[in-house]
Image (spheres, rainbow, N blue to C red):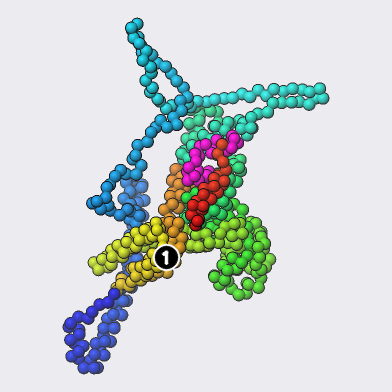
Amino acid sequence: MTSSSSPVLTHALSSAPSDGVDRWVALVRQQQATIQGQQKTIEVLERQLRQQQERIEQLEAELRAQKKLKGKPKLGPSRLNEPLPKTDGESKGKRPGSAKRSKKVGFEIHEERIIPPSAIPDTAKFNGYRDYDVQELTLKRHNIRFRLAEYVCEDGTTLVGQLPEEYRHGHYGPLLIGYILYQHYQCRVPHPLIHEQLQEWGIDISTGQVHNLLSENKESFHAEQQQVLRVGLETASYVHTDDTGARHQGKNGYCTVIGNAYFTYFRTTTRKSRQSFLETLQGETPCYVLNEYAQQYLQSYSLAAKHWQHLTFSAQVLAQDPVQWQTYLTSIGIVTPQAVRLVSEAALLGGVIERGVDRHLILLSDGAPQFNVLVHALCWVHAERALRRLEGNTRQQRQNIEEMQQGLWQYYQQLKAYQQAPTAAGKETLEQAFDQCFGRCFLHHASLNTVLSQFRAHKAELLRMLDFPQVPLHNNAGESDIREYVTRRKVSGGTRSDAGRRARDTFVGLKKTCRKLGLSFWQLLLSRLRGDGQIPPLPDVIRAMTSGLRQINSPT
């Protein structure tokens, strides 16, 4: 961006002697330096003012909460994914989801009641029936007493009848256990309300037993969820990820979600770091492997030279839990915190790849540094927030911000069009357009220039979709997945037992996975509790669906 000198200054410079010109030039440079210094001071003051304003808003929010007043309205969502306005020639049509459907398709009749008129004249002639269908639900306690016949043989041995398989796991039937699980994990009903509801129906059960049915002895569900993660990562071309705060035993923690269009996996940990995320990618049983990929990772992060002589790289599993791994590091003399962190991250990354995850797997995130592993892709919606946060001090600065936002929205629409029909020429055009749009520099607007430099620094991650059109431009799916946990946290708070935390992560993940696969979570619970195999294993469903997708996308 250029600016021209004023006519008065030009005339003064042309009419002044040479030594006078030098003084004028020095004076102009001095004024420019003063202006730049003042601009930096203004930005510092703006930052302090913004922090103070945020603190004031926080205190006002606390005051409103104490007085039980309504909160401040929230800002609207990003406009990046809004559809373009229709032209006059285009028909608006019906909104999505408003089309009528037949409610009689697959309608099964369980009971028929014939109702004659209250009074029938003798001359009346029967003319058939008018059908009036009503959907009803039967809710009642149903106690079963199994009388196991017992026989004594001649040799003194005893023969006793065996309970059906589905009733061998306690004094509560699979339908009752499934209902409790469904109410809590699908409908988000807290423990006390479930207990109160069951008591009103005449079910003799304690609050402790409700907790046990929700959390204890769920190893088969945990195993299936771990396989969902393993198969989901093995069959995926990309996954999205996000995290949020989690309270456990009165302490702060973090819940991380990993998924895509076919699966969802949750895991709650005590810390928020890249090492913790790599452990989550491996599931509940991490392994540490210093293979060639771990070696490349350490080279990219410049591990100190004195540590290399202690490391050997192969496909051998060096440890299968953090305690064994710490013992191994101590045995080879790696004890400094930075070296331990880097080598641990490298070994966990090696373990991820050794377990079948493609090293070219794309991880789509909001830009948090702990997610920057394998092939990283960034969300455009989160990147655009940096522009929306800017507040210009002058009319020119506000105009510059509006101009960049308009350019970003137009470029985003071009990226969406490219996803529908990717071509080599389109890729080259969009790469050049990125440089033209975000390669600009604005005079006297340092904060906007800083945001644009961040766009340029993350160009490869923002444009990952040009090489992989199946990767979304935003992380909205990850935000939607983690929203499930946020809502549950608001309803039930944190967890108290390790079994409860693990059960919550497992069942919420299975619920989201069923929804993505088009399966009924209720039917899944009953099938697993009864052991009838009516719902196939979710990993097999994921393999089948992704295999069909790969066949469609493969070149002929």
* 201 vs 93: above or below: above
* 167 vs 430: above or below: above
x%, y% of residue 63? 34, 50
Q: The magenta stretch spans which residues?
A: 507-533
Any part of residue 63 in sight: yes
Residue 271 vs residue 167, the one in the foreground: 167
Q: Is residue 235 left or right of residue 426?
A: right
x%, y% of residue 500? 55, 44
Does the stretch in magenta take in 286?
Answer: no
Q: Which residue does the image show at 57% across and 46% down from the upper left? A: 540
The residue where tag 1 is placed is: 424
Q: Label 1 sits on what residue type? A: Ala
Q: Is residue 481 left or right of residue 37?
A: right
x%, y% of residue 174? 57, 33
Q: Which residue does the image show at 33% across and 53% down from the upper left? A: 82
Does the stretch in magenta take in 511?
Answer: yes
Any part of residue 330 in sight: no
Give the main secondary structure of the magenta stretch.
helix
Residue 171 vs residue 436, the one in the foreground: 436
Number of numbered discs overlaid on the protein picture: 1
